[in-house]
């Protein structure tokens, strides 16, 4: 694979993104089809039903049609942007997803900002510096990487919500309700970001230009800010896929711990109640977001780092 | 939940993550993405972005002192004893209820306090080690086996099969690991074995790509080419040279990956999808105990501490292993 | 592009949300609840939360008084024919629905017909009026309802929110949207419903037809009512403690201590009527088909101790298949199957379960004494601690309770067929002893729309339940239902565990909150005032 023209590169990547979305939708559809148990009975809940009523609902929902027909109908609706109607909530999945999206996006943006800021501060203060601060920061990284998010959440909730009463224990509205979930999610990511950033900064501090700047008498902090930081940010961009995944996965756990509304919790509930349209809806939307953002980041990356275009693979 | 690999979809080596290749300590997943890529290109092509001036030896200086590794090993030893022979450490049976003494704070009789049924939290944490470790290690085994088979299949099966396997892993990897695991659990139902399979399946694509990349490098290397030129059967060359030489980095990565697999397993349990009550799995214990943390603080602290200490220890030891391994291969290349 | 636009709107709405402060709520009460409704058409949903919400949106024909009598509400008066099969209702004048439609006898017929219409897919209301045959509108204020059999529970059924009267215009023209756009005549009307988040209602300014039990007449005191969905008990309590909500339902019993200590919060408590939290037993096949094993199981668990500890003294243990606040409850069942592990062991020995395996579980003919007890996390998760306690105690006498989480589909498959399980848990709120027939009547199998999963067929019990349903004389009903309750205990046909309690926590600004007979809170009389 030598260097392709940017247009062809982009076309190929977009095609792949479509494939990913399509594949995720198919996987989600199959997953739900493969799940043992009768979906119609599941939908009716634990209240006993007559066989007649069950069959009527089965027909109304189209569950008595062949698998391939249902798959075809599903894809057809998907292409037109119709994600179907939730069995449990009797509401279009699209409005359900858009209604919950902002809550998760707010959480993710806040957490990402916090994590990035924390990682920048940690790395700028310690990269290539003295042994003790580096070690402390390194241990902090290790600790936040190794502590499960749900535990951090429970601890923060106990201390700041129940003991000190500084933040509400529940509720998605308002800034005060966002603080603890966002901090929890940020803590689960900051270690990884700060490690990668520091590594890259330390590598660039050994480059000839950095060494010569140092020889000219530039202070270490200035060196880090002026030269190393820029180089450090590049590998961070490549972590965008991991970051997005961590944010979305983290949302499932953190929205559960803090009883916060959002896509993650909708998905978790929908999976346990076998609400197929909601599951496929959330899966397709997040896969699409995932694919698009990754393409955008890769494109951005090719622009800022021309070496890649020369090297190719 | 950090068990997803930071590989931009479809970017087999064309992505830029090589710079992250040598990130130290436990950036397990970041490291995988990078290793997978470095593996996918041949060593001489890798040179430009490696930066010639960078002294590899200095990179390998461990951030954590020897003491850290010693402590980590001790922690792992204690966890291993608890997992293999919990009766040695536990004070009583993990499911022995004693309603009269429910929700008592830590004291002499109950070092970690008691839960809402009067069960001894310390004994439950000790007995939980086996469940949590089994879940984590089991899912890594599933991921390694499935990933290796898939990766070797891609290399051995020709262009079309390779393309198919890579596209499938693209799709799977375009999706956050926990969500993928949730989907699998939704199909299989909750439980220890199913959670293990789910997490394993969710991380298998990463392993598949790593194996594939390694196998391609090995296949292109001089001695394998020589063997082929000498007329040895391709299949036998594949089995005797390519396969064994592709595996060491996989095992190293598996060690590093174990930490995040344990976190993933506990998270599934926390969501109620792992081992079932009254099993004292650490994540499940926290989920059950969090409503009572204001009455008995031990319930919210010790099970989480156990997960964290175990994962820290695994990450420290795993990183050490990886660095030794990388030091060796780096040395060998030059 | 679309995604970017979404991200932008998301951030701006996030900022707007940040400006909301709890104090800007004005005269609107916010109530935190753990469940959210699936559908607000009262004739469709079986959920408790639907009754709680719909009570504010819909009025019923009759009101049930605390003493179990029925009083006029939308029905001014009524008469029952001598054979108990014909009810003639004279309905009230001057009532209008939220959509402006006047309330007449036609609305009653439309609502009852809607409840039993197969297309409604009623999950509960239809079974409440299973005796319903037809309605005939005589004139705008008179409707005659025909039943297929005498049904002494019919008025109670009509008094529930599940048979709240809907606007006939809405039933006719709004068929597809009845779940989301309910139109009744209640003191509040629905203004918004954000899934997974909250449900908003505003005062109906024209309301002048409150039932006799209400403390005032005219429109509700509150300008509005917001129901917020907060699943987690701890989080819900936290929302109350920090003033985000004014009141919450289902206060976790563990938090009552903290609630009392705060000084600014109060709690109200009402025991739910109906069937307590009960473990239904497979009397047809497996080890529990043997009455001695059932009796041993009942005596192997120390429910007094477990319920007291796990619910912090707020719940009491249940002795019989009805709770004490249910009409015609018989106290004669109390103390009949006390914790007695020695007696349990003796019974099991007598039943031939004499061997032991390596875990100490009893064995007979090479098979362990294992009782499969599947549960659904979302439904039964809250009683998991109790189940684990029972599991540990039953193990002491050699019984292996397999309390296992399954998904809803698998659970329903098992309960539908009555196979692959020995026990399952349920409770059921209804202020009417006829509910026993739903669970234990030989004809009320799942296939017939009942809850008799294990096809229990006990002629003595059947006769007592039929007598109770047919009798109109209170003394005859009491005698019949006492016989039924005793029979259930005598033969150990079920394992009642605890009496569910409606625990409502409020801030000290909330005045006038009380419970209706089904132990759901009523908001019509509530006033938000100064702390007292």
Image (cartoon, rainbow, N blue to C red):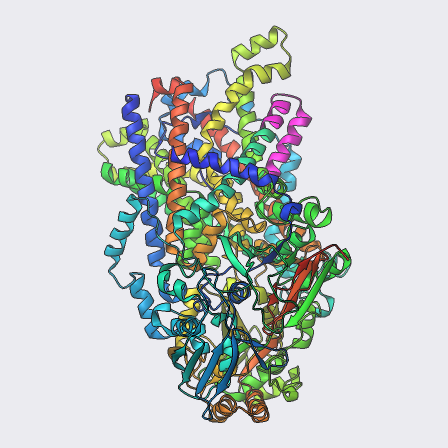
Vertical placement of A221 versus C249: above or below?
Answer: above
Percent of width and height locating residue C32 = 60, 57
Q: Is residue B301 magenta?
A: no
Percent of width and height locating residue A212 = 56, 8
Q: How many numbered dots are placed on residues in this image? A: 0
Query: Which residue corresponds to the image point at 43% horizontal and 46% vertical from the top-left?
Result: A97
Q: Write the start and end of the magenta stretch as one range.
A: A120-144
Q: Is residue B161 left or right of residue C321?
A: left
Q: In this view, does C471 lie to the left or right of A177?
A: left
Image quadrant containing the C terminus of chain C: bottom right
Can residue B224 be seen here?
A: no
Percent of width and height locating residue C135 = 39, 79
Q: Is residue A139 magenta?
A: yes
On the image, which quarter does residue A222 sit in?
Answer: top right
Q: Is the magenta stretch mostly helix, strand or loop?
A: helix
Query: Which residue corresponds to the image point at 33% horizontal and 57% vertical from the top-left?
Result: A33
Can residue A12 be seen here?
A: yes
Vertical placement of C235 versus C278: above or below?
Answer: above
């Amino acid at each position: 694979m030598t260097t392709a023209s940017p247009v062809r590169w982009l076309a190929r990547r977009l095609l792949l993104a479509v494939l990913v979305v399509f594949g995720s939708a198919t996987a989600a559809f199959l997953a739900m089809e493969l799940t043992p148990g009768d979906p119609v009975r599941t939908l009716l809940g634990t209240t006993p039903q007559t066989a007649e009523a069950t069959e009527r609902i089965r027909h109304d929902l189209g569950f008595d049609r062949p698998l391939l027909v249902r798959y075809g109908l599903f894809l057809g609706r998907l292409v037109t942007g119709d994600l179907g109607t939730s069995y449990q909530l009797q509401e279009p999945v699209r409005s359900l997803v858009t209604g919950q999206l902002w809550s998760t996006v707010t959480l993710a943006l806040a957490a990402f900002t916090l994590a990035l800021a924390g990682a920048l501060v940690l790395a700028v203060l310690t990269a290539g510096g003295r042994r003790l601060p580096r070690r402390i920061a390194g241990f902090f990284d290790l600790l936040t990487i190794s502590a499960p998010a749900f535990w951090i959440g429970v601890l923060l909730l106990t201390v700041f919500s129940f003991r000190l009463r500084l933040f509400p224990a529940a509720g998605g509205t308002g800034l005060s309700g966002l603080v603890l979930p966002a901090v929890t999610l940020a803590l689960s990511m900051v270690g990884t970001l700060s490690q990668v950033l520091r590594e890259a900064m330390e590598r660039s501090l050994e480059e000839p230009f950095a060494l010569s700047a140092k020889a000219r008498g530039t202070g270490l902090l200035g060196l880090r800010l002026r030269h190393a930081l820029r180089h450090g940010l590049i590998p961070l961009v490549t972590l965008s896929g991991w970051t997005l995944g961590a944010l979305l996965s983290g949302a499932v756990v953190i929205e559960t711990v803090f009883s916060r509304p959002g896509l993650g919790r909708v998905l978790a509930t929908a999976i346990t109640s076998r609400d197929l349209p909601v599951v496929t809806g959330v899966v397709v939307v997040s896969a699409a977001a995932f694919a698009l953002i990754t393409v955008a980041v890769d494109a951005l990356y090719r622009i800022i780092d021309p070496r890649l275009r020369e090297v190719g693979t | 939940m950090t068990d997803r690999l930071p590989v931009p979809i479809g970017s087999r080596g064309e992505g830029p993550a090589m710079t992250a290749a040598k990130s130290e300590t436990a950036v397990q997943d970041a490291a995988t993405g990078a290793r997978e890529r470095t593996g996918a290109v041949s060593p001489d092509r890798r040179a430009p972005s490696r930066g010639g001036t960078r002294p590899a030896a200095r990179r390998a200086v461990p951030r954590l002192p020897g003491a850290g590794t010693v402590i980590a090993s001790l922690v792992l030893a204690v966890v291993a004893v608890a997992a293999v022979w919990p009766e040695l450490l536990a004070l009583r049976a993990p499911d022995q209820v004693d309603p009269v003494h429910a929700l008592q704070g830590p004291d002499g009789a109950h070092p970690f306090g008691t839960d809402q049924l009067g069960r001894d939290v310390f004994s439950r944490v000790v007995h939980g080690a086996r469940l949590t470790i089994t879940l984590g290690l089991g899912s890594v085994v599933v991921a390694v086996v499935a990933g290796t088979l898939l990766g070797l299949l891609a290399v051995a099966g020709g262009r079309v099969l390779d393309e198919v396997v890579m596209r499938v892993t693209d799709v799977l990897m375009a999706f956050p690991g926990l969500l993928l695991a949730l989907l699998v659990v939704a199909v299989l139902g909750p439980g220890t074995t199913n959670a293990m399979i789910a997490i394993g399946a969710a991380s298998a694509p990463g392993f598949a790509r790593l194996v594939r990349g390694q196998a391609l490098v090995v296949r292109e290397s001089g001695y394998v080419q020589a063997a082929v030129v000498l007329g040895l059967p391709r299949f036998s060359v594949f089995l005797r040279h390519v396969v064994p030489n592709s595996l060491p980095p996989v095992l190293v990565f598996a060690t590093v990956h174990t930490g995040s697999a344990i976190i993933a397993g506990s998270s599934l349990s926390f969501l109620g999808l792992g081992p079932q009550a009254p099993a004292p799995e650490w994540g499940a214990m926290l989920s059950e105990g969090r409503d009572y943390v204001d009455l008995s603080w031990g319930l919210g602290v010790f099970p989480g501490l156990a997960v964290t200490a175990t994962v820290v220890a695994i990450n420290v030891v795993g990183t050490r292993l990886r660095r030794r391994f990388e030091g060796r291969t780096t040395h060998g290349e030059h | 592009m679309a995604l970017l636009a979404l991200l932008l709107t998301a951030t701006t709405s996030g900022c707007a949300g940040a400006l909301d402060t709890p104090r800007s709520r004005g005269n609107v009460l916010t109530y935190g609840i753990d469940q959210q409704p699936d559908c607000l058409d009262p004739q469709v949903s079986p959920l408790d939360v639907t009754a709680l919400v719909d009570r504010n949106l819909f009025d019923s024909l009759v009101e049930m008084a605390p003493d179990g009598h029925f009083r006029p509400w939308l029905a001014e008066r009524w008469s029952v024919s001598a054979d108990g099969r014909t009810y003639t209702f004279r309905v009230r004048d001057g009532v209008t629905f939220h959509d402006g439609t006047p309330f007449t006898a036609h609305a009653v017929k439309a609502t009852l017909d809607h409840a039993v219409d197969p297309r409604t897919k009623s999950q509960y209301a239809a079974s409440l009026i299973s005796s319903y045959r037809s309605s005939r509108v005589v004139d705008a204020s008179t409707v005659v309802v025909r039943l297929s059999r005498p049904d002494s529970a019919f008025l109670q059924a009509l008094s529930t929110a599940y048979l709240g009267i809907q606007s006939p215009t809405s039933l006719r023209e709004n068929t597809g949207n009845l779940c989301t756009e309910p139109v009744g005549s209640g003191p509040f009307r629905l203004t918004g419903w954000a899934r997974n988040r909250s449900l908003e209602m505003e005062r109906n300014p024209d309301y002048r037809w409150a039932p006799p039990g209400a403390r005032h007449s005219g429109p509700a005191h509150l300008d509005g009512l917001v129901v917020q969905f907060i699943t987690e008990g701890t989080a819900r309590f936290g929302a109350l403690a920090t003033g985000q909500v004014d009141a919450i339902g289902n206060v976790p019993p563990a938090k009552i201590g903290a609630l009392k200590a705060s000084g600014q919060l109060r709690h109200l408590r009402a025991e739910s009527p109906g069937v307590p939290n009960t473990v239904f037993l497979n009397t047809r096949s497996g080890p529990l088909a043997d009455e001695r094993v059932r009796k041993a199981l009942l005596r192997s668990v120390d429910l007094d101790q477990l319920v007291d500890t796990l619910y912090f003294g707020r719940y009491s243990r249940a002795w019989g298949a009805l709770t004490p606040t249910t009409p015609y409850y018989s106290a004669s069942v109390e103390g009949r199957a006390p914790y007695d592990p020695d007696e349990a062991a003796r019974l099991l020995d007598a039943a031939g379960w004499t061997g032991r395996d390596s875990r100490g579980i009893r064995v007979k003919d090479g098979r362990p004494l294992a009782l499969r007890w599947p549960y659904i996390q979302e439904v039964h998760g809250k009683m998991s601690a109790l189940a684990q306690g029972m599991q540990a105690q039953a193990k002491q006498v050699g019984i292996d309770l397999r309390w296992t989480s399954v998904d809803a589909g698998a659970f329903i498959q098992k309960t539908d067929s009555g196979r692959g399980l020995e026990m399952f848990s349920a409770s059921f709120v209804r202020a009417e002893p006829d509910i026993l027939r739903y669970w234990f009547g030989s004809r009320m199998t799942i296939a017939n729309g009942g809850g008799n999963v294990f096809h229990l067929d006990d002629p003595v019990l059947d006769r007592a339940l039929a007598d109770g349903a047919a009798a109109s004389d209170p003394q005859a009903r009491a005698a019949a239902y006492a016989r039924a309750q005793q029979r259930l205990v005598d033969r150990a046909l079920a394992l009642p565990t605890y009496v569910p309690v409606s625990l409502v926590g409020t801030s000290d600004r909330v005045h006038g909150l009380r419970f209706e007979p089904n132990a759901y809170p009523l908001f019509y009389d509530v006033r938000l005032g100064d702390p007292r």
